Amino acid sequence: MWEDVTGRPVGRKEALEHMKRSRGEGLVHLIGRNKLDPVWLDVGPDEKFLTICNCCSCCCLWRMIDDLSPEIRAKIKKMPGIRVKVNDRCTGCGSCQDVCFLNSITIEDEKAIISEECRGCGRCVNSCPDDAIEIAIEDQDYLERSIEEISSVVDLS
Protein backbone atom coordinates (compact mmCIF):
# COMPACT_ATOMS: atom_id res chain seq x y z
CA MET A 1 0.00 0.00 0.00
CA TRP A 2 1.15 3.53 -0.75
CA GLU A 3 2.26 5.82 2.04
CA ASP A 4 0.10 8.92 2.26
CA VAL A 5 2.33 11.87 1.43
CA THR A 6 -0.38 14.49 1.03
CA GLY A 7 0.95 17.90 1.90
CA ARG A 8 4.42 16.85 3.00
CA PRO A 9 7.31 18.83 1.52
CA VAL A 10 9.88 16.64 -0.23
CA GLY A 11 13.17 17.24 -1.95
CA ARG A 12 14.02 16.64 -5.59
CA LYS A 13 15.32 13.08 -5.08
CA GLU A 14 12.28 11.90 -3.12
CA ALA A 15 9.88 13.57 -5.59
CA LEU A 16 11.58 11.82 -8.53
CA GLU A 17 11.47 8.45 -6.76
CA HIS A 18 7.79 8.94 -5.99
CA MET A 19 7.06 9.85 -9.62
CA LYS A 20 8.92 6.76 -10.87
CA ARG A 21 6.93 4.50 -8.53
CA SER A 22 3.70 6.18 -9.56
CA ARG A 23 4.47 5.79 -13.27
CA GLY A 24 5.27 2.12 -12.65
CA GLU A 25 1.77 1.76 -11.21
CA GLY A 26 0.25 3.31 -14.34
CA LEU A 27 -0.66 6.59 -12.66
CA VAL A 28 -0.64 9.89 -14.57
CA HIS A 29 1.53 12.76 -13.33
CA LEU A 30 -0.07 16.17 -13.13
CA ILE A 31 2.09 18.97 -11.85
CA GLY A 32 0.61 22.33 -11.04
CA ARG A 33 -1.13 24.49 -8.54
CA ASN A 34 -4.47 23.22 -7.32
CA LYS A 35 -7.14 25.71 -6.25
CA LEU A 36 -7.55 23.70 -3.05
CA ASP A 37 -3.86 23.97 -2.06
CA PRO A 38 -4.44 27.10 0.07
CA VAL A 39 -7.16 25.26 2.01
CA TRP A 40 -5.46 21.86 2.31
CA LEU A 41 -1.89 22.99 2.72
CA ASP A 42 -2.19 26.56 4.00
CA VAL A 43 -0.11 28.11 1.21
CA GLY A 44 -0.67 31.61 -0.03
CA PRO A 45 -0.66 32.83 -3.62
CA ASP A 46 2.79 34.45 -3.23
CA GLU A 47 4.51 31.25 -2.10
CA LYS A 48 6.64 29.27 -4.53
CA PHE A 49 4.71 26.04 -4.49
CA LEU A 50 3.52 23.31 -6.87
CA THR A 51 1.85 20.00 -6.17
CA ILE A 52 2.34 16.66 -7.87
CA CYS A 53 -0.82 14.64 -8.33
CA ASN A 54 -0.66 11.10 -9.64
CA CYS A 55 -4.15 10.48 -10.90
CA CYS A 56 -5.62 7.03 -10.61
CA SER A 57 -8.63 5.69 -12.46
CA CYS A 58 -10.76 5.34 -9.32
CA CYS A 59 -10.97 8.99 -8.30
CA CYS A 60 -9.29 11.28 -10.78
CA LEU A 61 -10.93 14.12 -12.66
CA TRP A 62 -9.43 12.60 -15.79
CA ARG A 63 -11.64 9.55 -15.28
CA MET A 64 -14.68 11.83 -15.26
CA ILE A 65 -13.72 13.87 -18.32
CA ASP A 66 -15.80 11.70 -20.62
CA ASP A 67 -18.93 12.61 -18.60
CA LEU A 68 -18.27 16.35 -18.29
CA SER A 69 -19.97 19.00 -20.39
CA PRO A 70 -18.14 19.98 -23.59
CA GLU A 71 -17.39 23.42 -22.11
CA ILE A 72 -15.56 21.96 -19.11
CA ARG A 73 -13.88 19.22 -21.18
CA ALA A 74 -12.42 21.86 -23.48
CA LYS A 75 -10.58 23.48 -20.55
CA ILE A 76 -8.48 20.36 -19.96
CA LYS A 77 -5.89 20.41 -22.71
CA LYS A 78 -2.97 18.37 -23.94
CA MET A 79 0.44 19.86 -23.20
CA PRO A 80 1.57 21.90 -26.21
CA GLY A 81 4.00 20.05 -28.43
CA ILE A 82 3.06 16.52 -27.28
CA ARG A 83 2.46 13.93 -29.98
CA VAL A 84 1.01 10.46 -29.38
CA LYS A 85 1.37 8.18 -32.39
CA VAL A 86 0.61 4.54 -33.24
CA ASN A 87 3.40 2.82 -35.18
CA ASP A 88 3.39 -0.24 -37.47
CA ARG A 89 3.85 -2.71 -34.60
CA CYS A 90 0.20 -2.26 -33.55
CA THR A 91 -1.79 -5.52 -33.66
CA GLY A 92 -5.10 -4.00 -32.56
CA CYS A 93 -5.15 -5.92 -29.26
CA GLY A 94 -7.10 -3.15 -27.51
CA SER A 95 -5.02 -2.94 -24.33
CA CYS A 96 -4.64 0.79 -24.96
CA GLN A 97 -8.42 1.22 -25.07
CA ASP A 98 -8.76 -0.37 -21.65
CA VAL A 99 -6.60 2.29 -19.95
CA CYS A 100 -7.64 5.46 -21.80
CA PHE A 101 -9.40 7.84 -19.41
CA LEU A 102 -11.01 9.66 -22.32
CA ASN A 103 -12.13 6.77 -24.50
CA SER A 104 -10.13 8.46 -27.25
CA ILE A 105 -8.81 5.24 -28.77
CA THR A 106 -10.71 3.03 -31.20
CA ILE A 107 -9.59 -0.08 -33.05
CA GLU A 108 -10.12 0.07 -36.81
CA ASP A 109 -8.79 -2.50 -39.27
CA GLU A 110 -6.78 -4.13 -36.45
CA LYS A 111 -4.96 -0.92 -35.59
CA ALA A 112 -5.42 1.60 -32.77
CA ILE A 113 -6.59 5.04 -33.84
CA ILE A 114 -6.05 7.92 -31.41
CA SER A 115 -8.59 10.76 -31.70
CA GLU A 116 -8.19 14.47 -31.07
CA GLU A 117 -9.70 13.90 -27.61
CA CYS A 118 -6.32 12.49 -26.49
CA ARG A 119 -4.67 14.64 -23.81
CA GLY A 120 -1.27 12.94 -24.01
CA CYS A 121 -1.21 11.30 -20.57
CA GLY A 122 0.81 8.30 -21.82
CA ARG A 123 -1.19 5.51 -20.16
CA CYS A 124 -1.68 3.86 -23.56
CA VAL A 125 2.07 3.97 -24.21
CA ASN A 126 2.82 2.11 -20.98
CA SER A 127 0.06 -0.46 -21.51
CA CYS A 128 0.95 -1.54 -25.05
CA PRO A 129 2.56 -4.99 -25.04
CA ASP A 130 4.03 -4.42 -28.52
CA ASP A 131 5.56 -0.95 -27.92
CA ALA A 132 3.32 0.24 -30.74
CA ILE A 133 2.39 3.63 -29.25
CA GLU A 134 4.90 6.41 -28.92
CA ILE A 135 4.74 9.72 -27.09
CA ALA A 136 7.13 12.49 -27.98
CA ILE A 137 7.69 16.19 -27.51
CA GLU A 138 7.76 17.72 -30.99
CA ASP A 139 8.82 21.21 -29.90
CA GLN A 140 12.38 20.92 -28.57
CA ASP A 141 12.20 24.39 -26.98
CA TYR A 142 9.12 23.39 -24.99
CA LEU A 143 11.10 21.92 -22.09
CA GLU A 144 13.23 25.04 -21.66
CA ARG A 145 10.17 27.31 -21.79
CA SER A 146 8.41 25.09 -19.24
CA ILE A 147 11.37 25.19 -16.87
CA GLU A 148 11.44 28.99 -17.12
CA GLU A 149 7.71 29.21 -16.44
CA ILE A 150 7.84 26.77 -13.51
CA SER A 151 10.86 28.58 -12.03
CA SER A 152 8.68 31.60 -11.38
CA VAL A 153 6.41 29.59 -9.03
CA VAL A 154 8.77 27.09 -7.41
CA ASP A 155 12.44 26.85 -6.42
CA LEU A 156 14.00 24.33 -8.83
CA SER A 157 17.48 24.39 -7.30
Image (tube, rainbow, N blue to C red):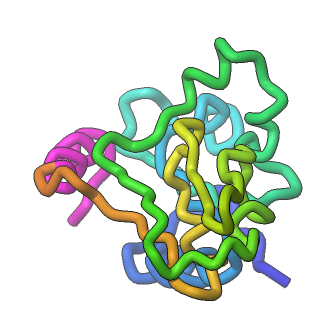
Who's the residue at 23% across and 40% down the image?
149
Can you tell which quarter of the image residue 2 is in?
Answer: bottom right
Which region shows up in magenta?
142-157
Who's the residue at 54% across and 63% down the image?
122
Furthest residue to the top?
71
19 up-or-down from 56: above or below? below
Q: Where is residue 17 drawn, in percent x and y?
A: 50, 84
Q: How many marks?
A: 0
67 up-or-down from 54: above or below? above
Residue 144 located within the stretch drawn in magenta: yes
Work out whether residue 53 or residue 24 is closer to the camera in this orientation and state it. Answer: 24
98 up-or-down from 155: above or below? below
Q: Which secondary structure class fits the magenta region best?
A: helix
Is 100 on the left or on the right of 89, as rendered?
A: right
Furthest residue to the front?
109
Location of the N terminus by quadrant is bottom right
Q: Where is residue 115 drawn, in percent x and y?
A: 57, 42
Residue 64 located within the stretch drawn in magenta: no
Who's the residue at 44% across and 27% down the image?
45
Work out whether residue 38 or residue 141 is closer to the camera in this orientation and state it. Answer: 141
Who's the residue at 59% across and 54% down the image?
113
Is 43 on the left or on the right of 107, as rendered?
A: left
Q: Where is residue 54 drawn, in percent x and y?
A: 64, 61
Can you tell which quarter of the image residue 6 is in?
Answer: bottom right
Is 96 on the left or on the right of 10, as rendered?
A: right
Location of the C terminus by quadrant is bottom left
